[in-house]
Each structure stands twice: as C-alpha cells, then as structure tokens.
Amino acid sequence: MWLLVMFDLPVTTKCERAAANAFRNDLLDIGFERCQFSVYLKYAEGYSQAGTISRKIQKCVPEEGKVYVLYFTDKQYESILRFENSKQLKRLENPGQFELF
C-alpha cells in the first residue's frame, strides 16, 4: 500500500517558513519521496506499517496549516496517469518484494 501526504502550510513569516521546511525534512527522514513541492509519497508493507508511519507524521505536523495523509492500494498506484511536459509517462510499477537470505 502507499501513503500520500499533501499539505498547505503558511510561509509568510520566517518562523512559519522554518516550520514548513522542518516538516518537509521530517517527511524525507521518515522515507518519503517528494512528488511535488507539497506532495510526498511512501510505500508501506500494509495497514499496520502505514499506521506507524502516520503516527510519525502526526508528531511532526506544524501548529498551523493543513496536512492530509491518504492511503491507497498497489493496484490504485499502478493506475496513476502521469504527464510531464504534456507527454504521458509510462506507468509506475510497485517495488518488488524484499528477499531475505
């Protein structure tokens, strides 16, 4: 399954900008990948791991602004249509399973 974090944080004051940047860095530290400036994506093994990740996010949320965390399945992820410079990109593939030796 996948987690998508979208947010709209105030950046009017120096303090607000610092809080927004700290939140972005926290998402990267948790293992998220930036899709757009305020949209981050991460793969989770299942609902249990997604819940753990969501609790980590909750601890990092700034005092002001809006943060949304969406869960969606591998199948939904594979059906995402992506466009760049008005050209459609190939579909994304889910990461392979981890192998332990």
Image (tube, rainbow, N blue to C red):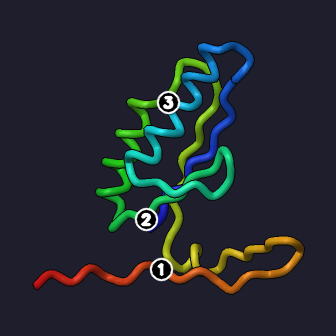
- The residue sitting at 42% across, 79% down in the picture is 95
Q: Nearer the viewer, residue 16 or 81?
A: 16
The mark nearer the N terminus, 2 or 1, is: 2
- Callout 3: few (<14), some (14-19), or many (20+) C-alpha neighbours within 10 Å? some
Q: Secondary structure at mark 2?
A: strand
Q: Above or below — where is 53 with respect to 59?
A: below
Locate residue 31 relative to residue 48 in the image: left or right.
Answer: right
Q: Which residue is mark 1?
A: 94
Tell me where residue 97 sits by quadrant.
bottom left
Q: Nearer the viewer, mark 2 or mark 3?
A: 3
Looking at the picture, which amino acid does disc 3 mark? Answer: Ala
- Callout 1: few (<14), some (14-19), or many (20+) C-alpha neighbours within 10 Å? few
Q: Nearer the viewer, residue 16 or 91?
A: 16
Q: Which residue is mark 3?
A: 22
Locate residue 78 relative to residue 8 in the image: left or right.
Answer: left
Measure the alpha-carbon separation of dots 1 and 3.
Answer: 29 Å
Q: Nearer the viewer, mark 1 or mark 3?
A: 3
The mark nearer the N terminus, 2 or 3, is: 3
The image position of residue 84, as x and y in percent, is 80, 72
Looking at the picture, which amino acid does disc 1 mark? Answer: Asn
Q: Are marks 2 and 1 in contact (CB under 8 Å)?
A: yes
Numbered mark located on residue 6 in the image: none
Measure the alpha-carbon separation of dots 2 and 3.
Answer: 21 Å
The image position of residue 44, as x and y in percent, is 38, 63
- Callout 2: few (<14), some (14-19), or many (20+) C-alpha neighbours within 10 Å? many
Q: Secondary structure at mark 1?
A: loop
Looking at the picture, which amino acid does disc 2 mark? Answer: Tyr
Tell me where residue 81 sits by quadrant.
bottom right
The image position of residue 1, as x and y in percent, is 44, 68
Q: Which residue is mark 2?
A: 43
